[in-house]
Image: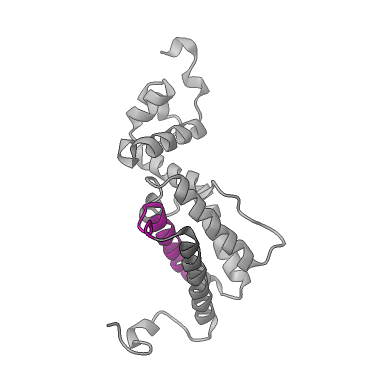
Amino acid sequence: MGSMGRPAQISRDAVLRASLAIADSAGLDAVTMQAVARRLGVTPMALYRHVAGKTDLLDALVEGLLTEFPLLEGDLPPGERLRALGRGVREVARRHPSLFPLLLQRPAATPGSRRVRDAVRAALEETGLGAEQARRAERLLSTVVLGFAASEAAGRFRDHPRSVIDEDFACLERVIGQVLEDLRRPGYGPALPRRGRRGEHS
């Protein structure tokens, strides 16, 4: 197989694209080192120069999903950057429905994934949150937005027109805004939920 010089042509990016294509067509379980190697026309051993194994491959797929939409930098207000990020996440979920739930299962492990997470935290700090509050807000925000996008991509809202789902998401953005307001309040901290705000959970 090496006579064509083919293995030299593969890169981490090629491995990532092949993995993404397999996941899109056959589901996440179909993504194995053997399947990716077959698709690229190389031996599985050739892949190990670019990914350390299945775990690394999954982390790379997370990075691929998170970096598929542009990170808005610069002069835009932080709220606008965060809203654009939410739109980007929903589009990626619609393009890769079988793969997207991976984002709910794995933390940001690669430099590319961490860059996206850090950009969200930076935007949150610009809204007036301290570093620790921004970390917490990012965790809450990403869980809510990724969960909504995953539900949408999986067809959970299929009985509703797209306009209604868009309105739902806009409503969610307002809720997130309220959470950020709460986190900015002095003294609002981790102990609060234990005291049961405004009535206990039903």
Please tell me which residue is depicted at 38% across the width and 87% down the height of the picture: 197
Residue 50, compared with residue 129, is above or below; it is: above
Please tell me which residue is depicted at 49% across the width and 55% down the height of the picture: 90
Please tell me which residue is depicted at 37% across the width and 45% down the height of the picture: 98
Q: In the rendered image, which quarter contains the C terminus?
A: bottom left
Q: Nearer the viewer, residue 12 or 196?
A: 196
Residue 111 x, y percent position in the rendering: 52, 48
Residue most extreme to the right? 75
Residue 192 x, y percent position in the rendering: 39, 84
Q: Nearer the viewer, residue 181 or 126?
A: 181
Q: Is residue 28 left or right of residue 137?
A: left
Residue 120 x, y percent position in the rendering: 55, 62
Residue 19, compared with residue 110, is above or below; it is: above
Q: Which residues are magenta?
A: 136-159
**Membership of 141 in magenta stretch:** yes
Q: In the rendered image, which quarter contains the N terminus?
A: top left
Q: Quadrant of residue 35?
A: top left
